[in-house]
Image: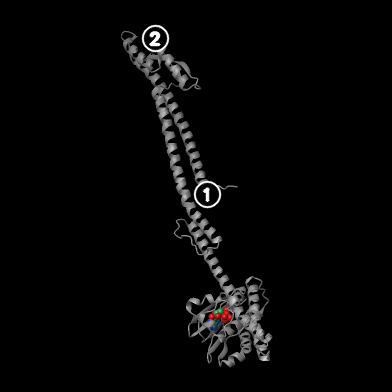
Amino acid sequence: MKKMRLRTSMSLAFAVLVALTVCMISLLSSYFIRKEFEEYVIFSEKKQADDYAENIESHYDESNGGFNIEYVNIMGMFALKDGFILRLYDADGNLVWDAENHDTEFYQEVMKSIAEEMEEKLPEFGGDFVTYDYNLESGDKQIGKLEIRYFTPYYLDDNDFRFITSLYRILSLAGLISIIVAIVFAILFARRITTPVSGVISLTKKISQGDYGVRVDMNQKDRETYDLANSVNHMAASLEEQEYLRRQLTGDIAHELRTPVTNISSYMEMMIDDVMEPTSERLKSCYDELSRLSDMIKDLERLEKAESGKIHLNKEDVELVSLSETILQSFETGIHEKNIEARVIGEEVHIDADRGRIAQVVANLLSNSLKYTDEGGKIVISVKKKKNTAELIVEDTGIGIPKEEEERIFERFYRTDKSRTRKTGGTGIGLTITRVIVQAHEGTITCESEQGKGSRFIVTLPIK
Ligand code: ADP
């Protein structure tokens, strides 16, 4: 199924949300403003009618006992123009002035136009003319009665309708502008989020195709996208490293296997062709090469087991000083041959560990020190107890390790250039296995070294 782009769906969601909000605000505000306006019109119409009654009342002439007809005339006509139909009676109920009779034609015109206008503009409205009576008094005396008819509940003239229409227009325009602005913002906002994501996606595609050298730009504005870029870069770096190690591993295995295999086959070939006698010395040499091959295969197997998490620890009480002494003894011949001064120092420290595997750690470190220390050198194994940990240090006065390679020597098959040129070189797996064992015991191993002076391997293991 074709998926919608994140940018499109985010912009859409944002725009729909804003459109809904704007519509709701417009509808509610136009409803309430309209309602308020209607109430205002009803109130002002009532006020206007009251004013007419009050004005006519005040134009009653006590001296001749009648209303000022001229004034009533003018006001009545003004009122009619505004949609108010006045009819005035005196105290005895005799008709004094009537808008209807005064100018019948104008009266009908006004009535018709009001009814038609309201019917046309508000067909559902259903209003009608209603008469309101006012008793006109002067002091305590009844001086007459005024009937005022006007369109109820209210009448909206052209100006009022113009006001309402322009109000609706302003609200719709404001709504439209808000929606357009919101859409522009939504697109910009979505782009701000999706651009780095798209960048990461195209890079991860490249990574998945094996191009591990690519990196995401770390100049990201948001924390999440920064973290995302950071994680992808870490992933790419570690894949690049793994790829490098895999290539190196394959190359190294081929390289390591080539020499013994070539040696053995050329010896064999010459012996088969009777070019060379199969003396026991030559057969021994072949056997030695085979042993080296077998050692490498064993190392690889051990490493595979250790690295694939199959390492199973049979924990027991292990005392580090006596264990180190036993291992040292097993290296006695080699130490003696190179005239090396080697010893174990320190206090007794007991840990809960797998004896065989810890012995392998000490043996690997000691064997390296012996390999990379020249004749007449020194090797010291010291054991110390720290708070909750035991510290075992194997220190030598050997060839040392360049600073920048101190971390790398723990990688499988990694060997420093100096050690590669030595006859006694190993397979570069020993320290990898050592670190796996130490880590399985929840310990750490680090190396401090100075080239040409010697190395210190510090193993820290928890006591219990
Ligand atoms: P190897 O079998 O080659 O010794 P290791 O994994 O044990 O493999 O060691 C990796 C590399 O670390 C060695 O090849 C060597 O270059 C370096 N190394 C290890 N221990 C020492 C040491 N004590 N002195 C100098 N270099 C060392």
Secondary structure, mark 2, is: helix
Q: Quadrant of the C terminus?
A: bottom right
Amino acid carrying label 2: it is Glu
Residue 448's x, y, as percent?
A: 50, 80
Amino acid carrying label 1: it is Leu
> Disc 1 to disc 2, how far (Cα)?
71 Å
Q: Residue at x 45, y 57 (%)?
A: 220
Q: Callout 1 environment at 10 Å: few (<14), some (14 to 19), or many (20+)?
A: some
Secondary structure, mark 1, is: helix
Q: Callout 2 environment at 10 Å: few (<14), some (14 to 19), or many (20+)?
A: few
- Report ligand 1 position as a quadrant: bottom right
Q: 18 or 416: nearer the eye?
A: 416
Disc 1 target residue? 6
Q: Is residue 253 above or below residue 64?
A: below
Q: Nearer the viewer, mark 1 or mark 2?
A: 1
Residues at circles 1 and 2 in contact by the CB criterion of under 8 Å? no
Q: 13 or 460: nearer the eye?
A: 13
Residue 130's x, y, as percent?
A: 46, 16
Q: Quadrant of residue 338?
A: bottom right
